Image (cartoon, grey):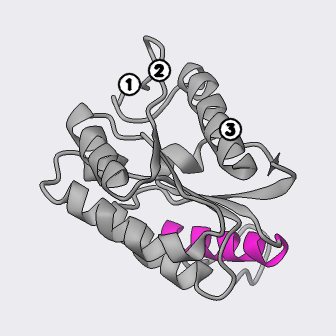
Amino acid sequence: MRNRFGEVSQHAFHDHAAVREFMIRAALTDAPAPIVVLGDSITEMAPLPRLLCGRPVINAGVGGQTIAEAKQLAGRMLQDQGAFLLVLAVGANDAGSPTAQRDFTDLIETVKPLSTRPLVVIAVAADERTNRAIEAAAAARGVRFVDPHLPPGAKMGDGIHFTAAAYKAWVPALEAAVSAECTM
């Protein structure tokens, strides 16, 4: 609180995940039968379209989120309303995890009933091993897996996050996969 001009305001720090969940819930409230893209920071930073297949697109990316955390978030947010179509774009924070495939299988099993249309899974992990584990989980459950071919220089200096050039390949691949599931 500021008592006089020049004093520094006091404020509480908010956990990023809690703020993102609040914002995602608010977006879901105004979006009947949306396409929800559930993910981590790769998704949160993505320049997703506002509409696909004539339906609102909700960016449900939360930086730092793991596959297991995405499963919990989806259960909390979508249990009452569900989604027209759910895209799973998570796994960057599970790189090197020996349980990535099992965790992704659990995620698919949890969210499949929450999506009217078939699920779509898109690669986001910086390492091939994790992407292959996610692909195996998707294939075992009959879920479309998309692995866009990212151009050279697709990662930022940290080797994880996507550059604008990467999103120029990743977003159209996501859009094409979603559009294909909308019309099936």
Query: Residue 106's x, y, as percent?
Result: 32, 70
Looking at the rendered structure, the kind of residue marked 3 is Glu
Q: In screen coordinates, is 147 left or right of 158?
A: right
The residue closer to the viewer here, 173 or 144, is 144
Residue at mark 2: 150
Q: Is residue 129 above or below residue 79?
A: above
Q: Residue furthest bottom?
A: 80
Q: Give the overall secondary structure of the magenta segment.
A: helix
Residue at mark 3: 175
Query: Residue 71's x, y, as percent?
Result: 41, 72
- Element carrying mark 3: helix
Query: Residue 141's x, y, as percent?
Result: 36, 59
Query: Residue 99's x, y, as percent?
Result: 17, 60
Looking at the rendered structure, the kind of residue marked 1 is Gly
Q: Residue furthest top?
A: 152
| Residue at 64%, 62% in the rendered image | 117
Nearer-N-terminus badge (1/2): 2
| Residue at 23%, 56% in the rendered image | 100
Nearer-N-terminus badge (3/1): 1
Q: Which mark is residue 157?
A: 1
